[in-house]
Amino acid sequence: MNYKYGDVIYWRNYRFDDGITGNKLLIVLSKPEGSSKCVSALTTSVPPPFDLVAGCNEQPRTMFKISQGTCKLKKETIVQLYRAEIYVLEPFSQDIKILFNLGANLTGQIKNCLKRAIDIYPEVKSLL
């Protein structure tokens, strides 16, 4: 499977930092040519305990709010950019599949928000 910029990935049995597994959506924000590594950010449909505007939100943590109906996502979705990481997505894993692509415009807005973030790893920023 060839992952590309803007892909929304469904990862069944994603392992969280605390060891718990669950199903998650990730958005590919950077995929260097010829590399198995990509910069992706987790998403959630659970609203945070504070208000967010549609688009880029830099405080108190960097997030990007995608309003319901903006794309093929069924619910209002928060891209947790403060949790952006470098992933190696296994091409033959049965637990990972591409659902759809957000398109260059929306993905570009999310990536630009991430570039402004101060709460991400330098290694992540270097791959943008």
Image (cartoon, rainbow, N blue to C red):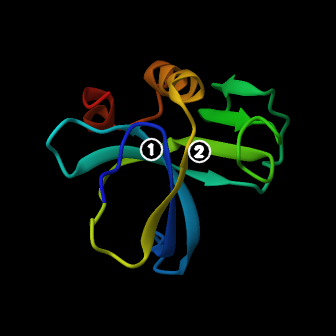
Q: Is residue 96 above or below residue 126?
A: below
Give how far across and how far down residue 76 sits, in percent: 80, 46
The residue shown at (78%, 53%) is 74
What label does residue 80 carry, if any? 2
Judge the density around disc 2: few (<14), some (14-19), many (≥20) Cα neighbours within 10 Å: many
Quadrant that contains the C terminus: top left
Judge the density around disc 1: few (<14), some (14-19), many (≥20) Cα neighbours within 10 Å: many
Q: With 38 as the anchor, is 57 left or right in this view?
A: right
User: Disc 1 designates what residue?
Assistant: 84
Q: Is residue 92 above or below residue 98?
A: below
Give how far across and how far down residue 60 sits, in percent: 67, 32
Q: With 69 as the anchor, is 17 left or right in this view?
A: left
Give the tally of numbered discs.
2
The residue shown at (26%, 31%) is 127
Find the distance from the CA under tag 2 to the CA under tag 1.
7 Å
Mark 2 in CB contact with mark 1 (< 8 angstroms): yes
Q: Nearer the viewer, residue 123 or 11?
A: 11
Question: For the residue marked with disc 2, what is the amino acid?
Answer: Gln
Q: Is residue 3 above or below residue 24?
A: above
Give how far across and how far down residue 116 sits, in percent: 49, 18
Question: For the residue marked with disc 1, what is the amino acid?
Answer: Ala
Q: Nearer the viewer, residue 51 or 95?
A: 95
Quadrant assignment, res 105:
top right
